[in-house]
Amino acid sequence: VLTIFWIVGIINAINWMDGLDGLASSLCLIFFTSFLGTGFFFSNLSSVLISSIFIGASLGFLYFNFNPAKILMGDCGSYLLGFNLSLISISANSNNINDLYSLHFYYPLIIISYPILDMIRVILKRLINKKSPFFPDRNHYHYVLIDKGITQRKTVFLIIALSIITNSI
């Protein structure tokens, strides 16, 4: 049950990051790079290989998706990245997935913390306002920054920098 909740949650979190040009693909590039490192650290060859594939795919797509975007990711692209990110986050950090009490169980939470925290914040805000958690709005951090007057490119760069700092720890 926890695994299904994790997979659906990460897919949803990455889908919600696709609100600005280049944001979801940039974040996934950072996350897959972090999982590439943890895959190397734990000698998990399959995670290294799959992370490498999605790093290349994210880089190739980002060239056409960054502001001003020539192509858009859409739901299918964000679902693909989110699904594979959730699976890599489960498998990359250990050769023993049942080792839930060790530190590497928390690696995925730290690596993917920005979309997870944004998703939790938006869902709680919607519930507090007595709206459906599935009702779209502009409560995501990236929309809040744009509404405060920060340009779309600067907002994306700010979130990327925050994610790089988080993943450097």
Image (cartoon, helix red, strand yellow):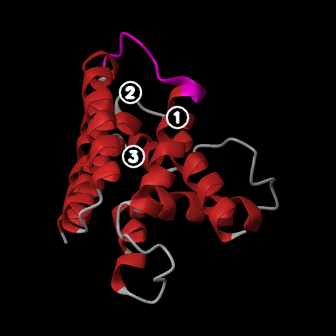
Report the magenta residues as a range: 67-76
Asked if residue 167 lies left or right of residue 11, the reply is left
CA gap, disc 3 and disc 1: 31 Å
The residue at the point 30 percent across, 56 percent down is: 35
Name the spot of residue 16 as percent of width and height, x first. Answer: 55, 43
Main SS type for the magenta part? loop
Judging depth in this view, the residue of 87 and 119 nearest the camera is: 87
Q: Is residue 145 above or below residue 24?
A: below
Residue 21 is labelled as 2
Q: Mark 2 against mark 1, which lies toward the viewer?
A: 1
Name the spot of residue 122 as percent of width and height, x first. Answer: 60, 58
CA gap, disc 2 and disc 1: 17 Å
Asked if residue 149 lies left or right of residue 125, the reply is left
Q: Secondary structure under badge 2?
A: loop
The residue at the point 81 percent across, 53 percent down is: 132
Q: Secondary structure under badge 3?
A: loop
Name the spot of residue 56 as percent of width and height, x first. Answer: 25, 30
Could you tell me if residue 31 is visible in this image?
no
Please tell me which of labels 2 and 1 falls first in the chain: 2
Please tell me which of labels 3 and 1 falls first in the chain: 1
Judging depth in this view, the residue of 160 and 31 nearest the camera is: 31
**Residue reaching furthest top?**
70
Kind of residue sitting beneath label 2: Asp
Please tell me which of labels 2 and 3 falls first in the chain: 2
Kind of residue sitting beneath label 3: Lys
Could you tell me if residue 22 is visible in this image?
yes
